[in-house]
Image (tube, rainbow, N blue to C red):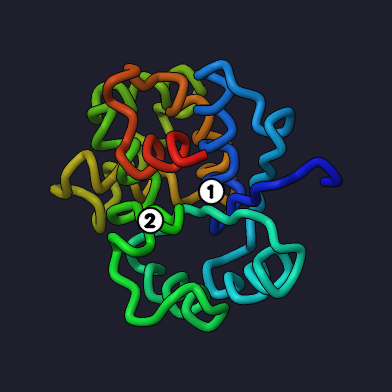
Amino acid sequence: MDDTHTVVLVEGLSDKSAVEALAERRGRSLTAEGIEVFAMGGATNIGAYVGKFGPSGRDLRLAGLCDAGEEGAFRRGLERAGFGSDLTRSDLEALGFFVCVADLEDELIRALGTATVERVVDAEGELRSFRTLQKQPGWRGRSTHDQLRRFMGSGGSRKIRYASPLVAALEPDRVPRPLDALLAYL
């Protein structure tokens, strides 16, 4: 942490894993570059982390990634820390904060396509579990995309476990925009 000049604030461990996996895939060592990725344990913790690492704390360069549903929490945290007022999504991006629609798993599933995600699930030995979810009354008839999002969000640490294999399956030109833009910003 002593050589750190940039802190990337993300909601959870799956986001941290995805950012680090994409950087590694692109031949980058964020730690060697002085960049640390912090999983905050939820978007509502943004204020505390901006306070700790931002201008009133260690005065490090900040960046981040959040879900669309948490954009407001990020915006308010940055505004309270003095990064501007009435911040728009474009303002957030200029500050290095990028928003996933609806969340990173949704972005990855759209970028990969459901057939590729199912192949990743199969390679992880969980295709049978996914098929079981698809047969449940509440999920029958729903799109495969929605079923995969639900599957990724269930099972405790499944989001964390799949972040890296899903990033590894991406074609270089199909990286979700928020993730790609964040790495380019760094």
Instruction: Find residue 69 and report its horizontal and vertical position in percent.
Output: 35, 68
Which residue corresponds to the image point at 29% horizontal and 50% vertical from the top-left?
136
Q: Which secondary structure lies at badge 2? A: helix
Camera-side residue: 57 or 174? Answer: 57
Which residue corresponds to the image point at 50% horizontal and 34% vertical from the top-left?
162
Camera-side residue: 71 or 41? Answer: 71
- The residue indicated by pointer 2 is 94
* Amino acid of disc 2: Ala
Q: Which secondary structure lies at badge 1? A: loop
Crowding at dot 1, Cα within 10 Å, few <14 / some 14-19 / many 20+, comes out as few
* Image position of 163 (left or right of 13): left
Instruction: Find residue 119 and report its horizontal and vertical position in percent.
Output: 35, 19
Q: Quadrant of residue 70?
A: bottom left
Which residue corresponds to the image point at 76% horizontal and 63% vertical from the top-left?
58
Which residue corresponds to the image point at 38% horizontal and 56% vertical from the top-left?
94
- The residue indicated by pointer 1 is 155
Give the vertical position of 157 relative to 95 (above or below): above
* Amino acid of disc 1: Gly
Instruction: Find residue 153 and report its horizontal and vertical position in percent.
Output: 45, 51
3D distance between C-alphas at marks 1 and 2? 36 Å
Instruction: Find residue 31 and report its horizontal and vertical position in percent.
Output: 72, 33
Give the vertical position of 171 relative to 104 (above or below): above
Label located before the other in sequence (1 or 2):
2
Crowding at dot 2, Cα within 10 Å, few <14 / some 14-19 / many 20+, comes out as few
Camera-side residue: 17 or 184? Answer: 184
- Residue 82's tag is none
Camera-side residue: 35 or 19? Answer: 35
Give the vertical position of 97 relative to 77 (above or below): above
